[in-house]
Amino acid sequence: MEIDGEDDYFVKNTPPKNINEVERKTKEFMKYQQEKGRRIVLVTSGGTTVPLENQTVRFVDNFSAGTRGSASAEYFIENGYAVIFLYRQHSLRPYSRHYSHSKNCFLDMLDIDKDNIIVNDKYKESMKSILERYKKTKAENLLLEIDFFTVKDYFFYLNKITKILATMEEKSMYYLAAAVSDFFIPPERMVEHKIQSGEGALKLSLDQVPKFLKPLVSEWAPKGFIVSFKLETDPALLISKARKALKRYGHQIVIGNMLLTRKKVVHFITNDEERKIEMTEEELNNGIEIETKIISELIKKHDQWINQSEANN
Ligand code: 9Z3
């Protein structure tokens, strides 16, 4: 059975326990940013899970380390935006991403000097610059982080936060970089306990999730500036699928990327243009990230979006 509408989905599924708290925090954050005259961008990041049992032991996951989202959040902040960062639990987060997972473990950057812990000279400069940006972001209240684990919770948060931010109309941006599952198990077919082995092969049947980008664009945030990502592994499909998504949902931009080259090249697909943004080997060797280019392009387009709507009013 395929569920058609979002209303159905939000009635049939149980909201996350802290949804009211998320609503309160989002409203408070938005009010603060509006008083400061700032724009807000919702950045979604990381992969969503689809649990196979209510008491979840196993789940189906979508690929994403959260690099795109967490790096982008930093660059938005550097450019004066306030960020709501909706991210997959334990995936990369702005600032701390520089010291997590297997890359750059912070313990390797520290030394012991008698009773003190000190930063190794080799890392001092870069750590100082990240720490300064992190402290400034906190002091100026520029970042609100909300985590999710399942695709269901992701949709509930997305719905709630988007509808709140939509009151900022054109000044809000939605940067949907999370890798969202296309499939889920509806509540009526979900088993309570761990699926037992010993009965042969595990046969799964997943329903298709409703296409939430549709109501997001047309009903939840009709005046917002909306950016979605299209991820493919077959290069022959990327551009046509990205264009199809743009046409289907009617939002402002789809950014197409391939799994294996996502850090080096992306394609901006809009109604009137198709543009490749690429990193040179030199840029990559110097540690420059493609997200700097993506964000500066998007901010220009967001400016145009705001100016255009002001001109029309
Ligand atoms: C993306 O395409 C992101 O750029 C990546 C980033 C997930 C590839 P990393 O976190 O990876 O830096 O490791 N996100 C969107 C993926 C997605 O689920 N898109 C849907 C689709 O392709 C549309 S909403 O159908």
Image (cartoon, rainbow, N blue to C red):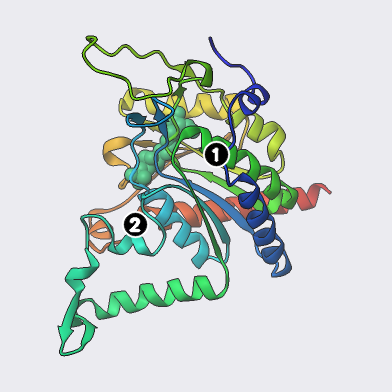
Residue 289's tag is: 2
* Vertical side of 192 occupied by 263: above or below: below
Residue 245: image x %, image y %? 53, 27
Q: Give, as a three-letter code, the residue at label 1.
A: Ile
Q: Quarter-wise, where is residue 125 in the image?
A: bottom left
Q: Earlier in the sequence, mark 2 or mark 1?
A: 1
Residue located farthest toward the front when viewing the structure as drawn: 193
Residue at image position (52%, 37%) is: 153
Task: Characterize the local packing of mark 2: few (<14), some (14-19) or many (20 or more) Cα atoms within 10 angstroms.
Answer: some
Q: Between residues 113 and 36, which one lies in front from this camera angle?
A: 113
Residue 150's tag is: none
- Is residue 147 found left or right of 306 in the rendered image? left
- Is residue 32 found left or right of 155 in the rendered image? right
Helix, strand or loop at disc 1? strand
Residue at image position (49%, 18%) is: 208
> Would residue 265 be visible to someone looking at this image?
no
Residue at image position (61%, 24%) is: 9
Residue 293: image x %, image y %? 42, 55
Q: Give, as a three-letter code, the residue at label 2.
A: Glu
User: Mark 1 — residue?
Assistant: 253
- Is residue 57 found left or right of 274 in the rendered image? left
Residue 90: image x %, image y %? 36, 50
